[in-house]
Image: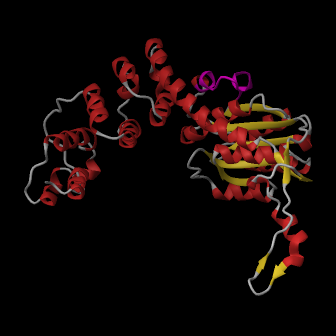
């Protein structure tokens, strides 16, 4: 029986890794996996030069449709999503998301959602209708996950008032220790608790806050665009929150009217183009009604194509008037940013909070300030 670890190395390296198996042949299923991986990665000239995976010299008999069927049958879900992503993003095999026959059969996942957003301008109306199914299903999954996090963030805050519900989550440790310090036992180093105290968990009165999301729709920000749309939809209609969503490149487009329908919103987004962050920040500043009850979230990689001095000035003015300014280099599940650190530092020096967040962390930040 073939050692599974050696077989994985053989599949990773392709035909040049045959020595891993000591002359043994792959079984039928592993050989089919190898053929599917070779269809994709065998076209990579860099891998060929490194002797990692070497595709055959003849024309492949597999079509994209056949390959998608094969990988669905042969690989686990996580691997399928990675293969989809590499096919579209690394090798630009656009018929993965532009062929009607493929779209009718393919299982939606986040990698395909990004591919649809990048290639929808290539699609005719029939294909676009099929692609919308991918957008709807993935957005629904993201909404279900994030809605739980948002509800948790806005479910109420602990207030310093005794409570009758003796639940572990409401235990007031500081007050309990203070009240029972007289029962400290030096020989054991412990405090004997006679009277425990608990918080009451109540919902504070929420005054109206504005949350203004300004989202860079350049191609590198596609993950953040998706999660911004879903986050805005989850914040929409919450008590005490008025949400705006604005997308920008060199132009500024106010998408607030579609915030409650993130699928429609994403289908309107046009990825790519230049970037004028200062223009978007100025537009966002113009939306502020009550400066001390406004959170302006600027989601961008901060590679400014406009006037960086103007951008810093707008941010400084927003902070001076009492608004909260968040500069997020990423808003997605990984929160791994790639950004212009020099400009980001200038924004931080102007008083903005600069970093990266997951959608749940952003919801918690908003809840913390709205609940004050």
Considering only vertical position in the picture, is 149 above or below 112? Answer: below
Counting from the top left corner in percent of width and height, residue 48 is at 23, 51
Residue found farthest to the front: 194
Magenta run includes residue 265: yes
Along the line of sight, the residue nearer the viewer: 158 or 83 = 158
Question: Can the viewer see residue 233?
Answer: yes
Whether residue 249 can be seen here:
no
What residue is at 69 percent from the left and 55 percent from the top?
Answer: 344
How many marks can you see?
A: 0
Colour pattern of the rendering: secondary structure
Give the side of residue 86 with respect to residue 273, left or right.
Answer: left
Vertical side of 238 occupied by 277: above or below: below
Left or right: 363 as drawn, with respect to 12: right
Tell me the quarter of the picture where residue 68 sits: top left
Q: Specify the quadrant of the image occupied by residue 227.
A: top right
Q: Foreground: 234 or 127?
A: 234
**162 vs 195, nearest the viewer:** 195
The answer to whether 7 appears left or right of 369 in the picture is left
Image position, residue 212 (x, y; %): 77, 36
Q: Which residues are magenta?
A: 253-266
User: Is residue 49 part of the magenta span, yes or no?
Assistant: no
The residue lying at 90 percent from left, 51 percent from top is 320
Quarter of the picture holding the N terminus:
bottom left
Instruction: State the image coordinates of residue 107 (x, y, percent, origin top left).
Output: 40, 28
Residue occupying image coordinates x 16% and y 50% = 15
Question: Residue pushed farthest bottom?
Answer: 187
* Residue 33, image quadrant: top left
């Amino acid at each position: 029986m073939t050692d599974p670890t050696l077989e994985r190395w053989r599949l990773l390296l392709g035909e040049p890794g045959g020595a891993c198996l000591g002359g043994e042949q792959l079984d039928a299923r592993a050989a089919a996996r190898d053929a599917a991986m070779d269809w994709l990665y065998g076209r990579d000239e860099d891998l060929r030069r490194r002797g990692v995976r070497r595709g055959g010299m003849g024309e492949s008999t597999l079509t994209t449709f056949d390959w998608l069927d094969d990988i669905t049958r042969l690989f686990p879900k996580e691997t399928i999503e990675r293969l989809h992503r590499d096919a579209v993003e690394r090798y630009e095999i656009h018929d993965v998301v532009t062929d009607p026959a493929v779209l009718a059969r393919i299982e939606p996942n986040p990698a395909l959602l990004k591919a649809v957003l990048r290639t929808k301008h290539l699609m005719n109306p029939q294909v676009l209708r099929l692609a919308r199914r991918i957008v709807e299903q993935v957005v629904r999954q993201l909404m279900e996950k994030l809605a739980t996090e948002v509800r948790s963030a806005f479910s109420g805050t602990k207030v310093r008032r005794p409570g009758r519900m003796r639940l572990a989550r409401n235990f007031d440790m500081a007050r309990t220790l203070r009240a029972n310090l007289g029962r400290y036992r030096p020989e054991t180093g412990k405090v004997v608790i006679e009277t425990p105290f608990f918080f009451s968990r109540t919902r504070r009165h929420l005054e109206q806050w504005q949350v203004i999301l300004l989202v860079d729709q350049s191609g590198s920000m596609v993950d953040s665009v998706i999660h911004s749309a879903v986050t805005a939809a989850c914040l929409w209609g919450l008590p005490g929150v008025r949400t705006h969503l604005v997308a920008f490149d060199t132009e500024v487009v106010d998408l607030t009217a579609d915030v409650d329908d993130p699928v429609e919103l994403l289908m309107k987004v046009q990825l790519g183009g230049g970037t004028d962050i200062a223009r978007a920040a100025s537009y966002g500043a113009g939306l502020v009604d009550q400066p001390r009850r406004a959170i302006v979230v600027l989601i961008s990689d901060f590679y400014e194509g406009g006037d960086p001095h103007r951008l810093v000035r707008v941010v400084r003015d927003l902070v001076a008037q009492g608004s909260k300014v968040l500069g997020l280099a990423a808003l997605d599940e990984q929160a791994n940013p790639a950004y212009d650190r020099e400009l980001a530092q200038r924004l931080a020096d102007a008083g903005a909070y600069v970093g990266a967040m997951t959608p749940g962390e952003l919801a918690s930040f908003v809840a913390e300030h709205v609940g004050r």
